[in-house]
C-alpha cells in the first residue's frame, strides 16, 4: 500500500501497474501541488472548509433563501462552542437561530410553493420547539442533549430547504440524453460484508454521474463485487469480473463512458468533460468537494477524464494527507454523493470485502433510465 510519502519511483510503478486506480492523481500529489497556482494555495484558509457531508449536501441544494441559510449556519456553528466547551458561543448561536425563526419565518415560507406551505409550517413549529430545547439544555450544560437536538433541528432545516427546490435547475446537454439521469437526490444502501453503508447521491449537482450509479444499482451490477485499496485515502469498487473494466450495455454491447461533471458554486450548470485545471480554474469552490470522509467519486483512466464507467471510490478523508480544500482530487474527479451513515463500516472495509447487495431506498422518482 502506497502513501504520499512513498518514493516517486514506487508511486509511478504502482500507477503504471494499474492505471484504473484513482491514485493516478493522488500518488503524484507532491509533484503537482507545487506547480498548480502556488499563490492561491498560500492564501487558502483550510480550517474553514465544511467537512460534514450532510452540511455539504444542504448547501448544494439549488435554492436562494438567505434566511434559511442563516438558520442553518447558526445551528451548525453550535458544534464549535461544544467542542471548545465555550458555552457562551453555544448560547450565541442558539439566540441567532431563535431570531431567524422569530423574524425570518415569513421570508422562509415565501420560498416554499403554496402546495407545500402547510408542511413547511409544521417544520418551523418543530424547529421552534427544538431551539427552545437547545436553550434549556445549554443552560443546564447538557452537552448530549444539545448534540442530539442540534442534529434533529438540522434534519428539519434540510427538509425545509428541500421544499424550496422548484424543478430541476438546468438543462442537461443533449449530448448526454442517451445516458441515465438523476434529476434530484436518491438514497442508496450498500450491504457489505462489514455492514451497511447509506449514501445520498446528488443529481442536482452531478445528474449524469449520479444517474449512472443509480442505474447500475437498479441493474444489480454491484452485487457481489469486491472492494480493493491501494492508497491510504481511498477504497474502490465496481470492477466487474472478466476483462472489462466498466459497464457494457447489454443492448448496445458498448462500453458506457461517463463524462467528467463538476459544478462550481455560483455556476448555473456543471462543467463537462474538462478538468478544472485544464480550463484554468484552480481551487474553485465546488458544490460537491472532496472535503468529507466518505465522499463518493467516479474512478477513471489516468489519461481520460471522460472514460469512467462503473468503478467508483470512497474518499477516506485524512487531515494531514488530504486536508479539506487542499488536495489534487477536487476538479479532477466527479464527486456524486456522500456517505451519510455507516462510517465505522467504511473504516473497517479492506481488500476482498464485498458488496453483498445494493438498493435504492428513496428517490427513484427522480431517476430516468438510459434511452
Image (spheres, helix red, strand yellow):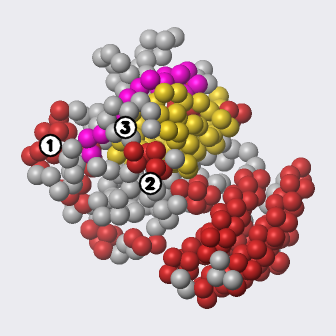
Q: Is residue 127 above or below residue 371?
A: below
* Viewer-proximal residue among 278 and 251: 251
Which residue position holds label 2?
A: 293
Query: Which of marks 2 and 1 precedes in the sequence?
Result: 1
Q: Find numbered disc 2 in the image and state the secondary structure of the residue it sits on.
A: loop
Which residue position holds label 1?
A: 12
Percent across and percent down for residue 255 are: 41, 20
Q: Is residue 64 visible?
A: no
Magenta residue span: 216-231
Percent across and percent down for residue 238 are: 41, 29
Residue 82 tag number: none
User: Any magenta on residue 69?
Assistant: no
Tell me if label 3 and label 2 are in contact, CB under 8 Å: no
* Viewer-proximal residue among 356 and 166: 356
Say which residue appears at 70% left-offset and 85% top-offset: 139
Which residue position holds label 3?
A: 236
Amino acid at each position: 500500500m502506497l502513501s504520499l510519502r512513498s518514493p516517486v519511483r514506487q508511486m509511478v510503478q504502482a500507477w503504471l501497474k494499474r492505471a484504473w486506480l484513482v491514485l493516478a492523481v493522488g500518488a503524484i500529489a507532491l509533484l503537482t501541488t507545487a506547480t498548480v497556482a502556488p499563490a492561491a494555495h498560500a492564501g487558502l484558509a483550510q480550517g474553514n472548509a465544511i467537512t460534514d457531508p450532510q452540511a455539504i449536501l444542504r448547501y448544494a441544494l439549488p435554492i436562494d433563501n438567505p434566511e434559511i441559510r442563516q438558520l442553518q449556519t447558526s445551528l451548525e456553528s453550535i458544534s464549535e462552542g461544544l467542542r471548545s466547551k465555550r458555552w457562551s458561543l453555544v448560547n450565541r448561536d442558539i439566540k441567532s437561530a431563535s431570531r431567524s425563526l422569530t423574524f425570518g419565518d415569513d421570508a422562509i415560507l415565501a420560498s416554499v410553493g403554496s402546495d407545500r406551505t402547510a408542511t413547511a409550517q409544521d417544520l418551523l413549529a418543530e424547529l421552534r420547539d427544538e431551539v427552545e430545547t437547545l436553550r434549556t439544555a445549554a443552560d443546564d450544560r447538557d452537552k448530549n442533549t444539545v448534540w442530539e437536538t442540534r442534529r434533529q433541528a438540522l434534519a428539519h432545516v434540510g427538509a425545509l430547504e428541500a421544499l424550496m427546490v422548484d424543478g430541476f435547475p438546468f438543462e442537461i446537454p443533449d449530448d448526454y440524453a442517451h445516458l441515465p439521469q438523476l434529476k434530484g437526490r436518491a438514497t442508496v444502501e450498500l450491504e457489505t460484508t462489514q455492514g451497511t453503508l447509506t449514501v445520498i447521491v446528488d443529481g442536482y449537482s452531478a445528474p449524469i454521474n449520479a444517474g449512472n450509479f443509480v442505474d447500475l444499482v437498479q441493474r444489480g451490477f454491484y452485487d457481489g463485487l469486491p472492494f480493493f485499496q491501494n492508497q491510504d485515502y481511498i477504497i474502490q469498487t465496481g470492477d466487474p469480473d472478466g476483462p472489462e473494466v466498466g459497464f457494457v450495455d447489454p443492448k448496445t454491447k458498448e462500453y458506457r463512458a461517463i463524462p467528467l461533471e463538476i459544478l462550481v458554486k455560483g455556476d448555473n450548470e456543471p462543467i463537462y468533460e474538462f478538468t478544472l485545471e485544464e480550463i484554468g480554474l484552480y481551487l474553485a469552490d465546488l458544490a460537491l468537494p472532496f472535503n468529507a470522509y466518505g465522499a463518493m467519486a467516479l474512478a477513471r483512466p489516468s489519461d481520460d477524464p471522460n472514460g469512467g464507467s462503473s468503478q467508483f471510490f470512497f474518499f477516506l478523508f485524512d487531515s494531514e494527507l488530504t486536508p479539506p480544500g487542499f488536495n489534487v482530487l477536487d476538479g479532477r474527479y466527479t464527486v456524486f454523493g456522500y456517505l451519510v451513515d455507516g462510517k465505522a463500516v467504511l473504516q473497517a472495509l479492506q481488500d476482498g470485502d464485498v458488496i453483498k447487495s445494493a438498493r435504492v431506498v428513496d428517490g427513484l422518482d427522480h431517476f430516468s433510465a438510459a434511452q
